[in-house]
Image (cartoon, rainbow, N blue to C red):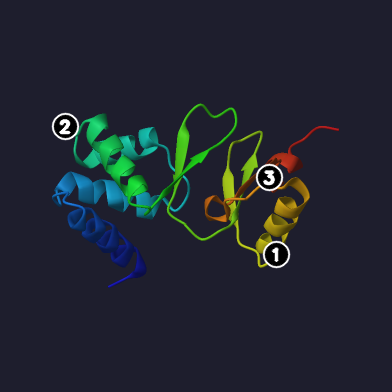
Amino acid sequence: MNNRQQQIDYLLDRLEAAGKRSTPQRHAVCQVLVEHGGHPTVAEVFERVRAAYPMISQATVYNTIDTLRELGLIQALDIVDHGHTHYDLDLRPHVNVVCTRCDTITDLHTDTLEALVSLVGQRTGYQIETQRGVVMYGLCPRCRGTQHS
């Protein structure tokens, strides 16, 4: 069994353990989340699932994603000026780098994140929520290359 299928099965098992029946629609939502490989919105997941299940409601997709979030299996990622929530299956502390031009979101895992979070906490007095990661904004290499001087 491949890693993606293991992830899908894990999400479905956790949903069932929480009392949610394993339906083809829920399976499709989990599959799209895993196969997206990025930070999809509910609308993006809905469009992909609807290709296989034209009668699925947006509420079913939203409720499945919301349950996964409540169970701590995915996290909501609110990006400034996006107007919609993205969802991240990568629960390890990391930096989400957002391109301010094309809206691409890139994950960066670094062993220095804990040191940065600790420094920010020390200097501000905040108790930083490391499990939510960090969001930074800038121009991705592709957009930076298309800039006019």
Q: Residue at x 34, y 46 (%)?
A: 70
Q: Position of residue 31 (x, y in %)?
A: 29, 53
Q: Which residue is mark 2?
A: 55
Of label 3 and label 2, which has the lower sequence position?
Answer: 2
Whether pointer 2 and pointer 1 mark residues with C-beta atoms closer than 8 Å, the reply is no
Amino acid type of the residue tagged 1 in the rendering: Thr
Crowding near pointer 3: few (<14 within 10 Å), some, many (20+)? some
CA gap between label 3 and label 1 equals 21 Å
Q: Which residue is mark 3?
A: 140
Closer-to-camera residue (22/19): 19
CA gap between label 2 and label 1 equals 46 Å
CA gap between label 3 and label 2 equals 37 Å
Whether pointer 3 and pointer 2 mark residues with C-beta atoms closer than 8 Å, the reply is no
Q: Against 83, is 18 above or below? A: below
Amino acid type of the residue tagged 2 in the rendering: Met
In this picture, residue 25 sits left or right of residue 69: left
Closer-to-camera residue (84/143): 84
Crowding near pointer 1: few (<14 within 10 Å), some, many (20+)? few
Checking the image for residue 4, the label placed there is: none
Checking the image for residue 112, the label placed there is: 1
Residue positioned most to the right: 149
From the image, state whether disc 3 or disc 1 is nearer to you: 1
Closer-to-camera residue (75/145): 75
Q: Residue at x 75, y 43 (%)?
A: 145
Q: Residue at x 14, y 48 (%)?
A: 23
Quarter of the image with the N terminus in it: bottom left
Amino acid type of the residue tagged 3 in the rendering: Cys
Secondary structure, mark 2, is loop
Of label 3 and label 1, which has the lower sequence position?
Answer: 1
From the image, state whether disc 2 or disc 1 is nearer to you: 1
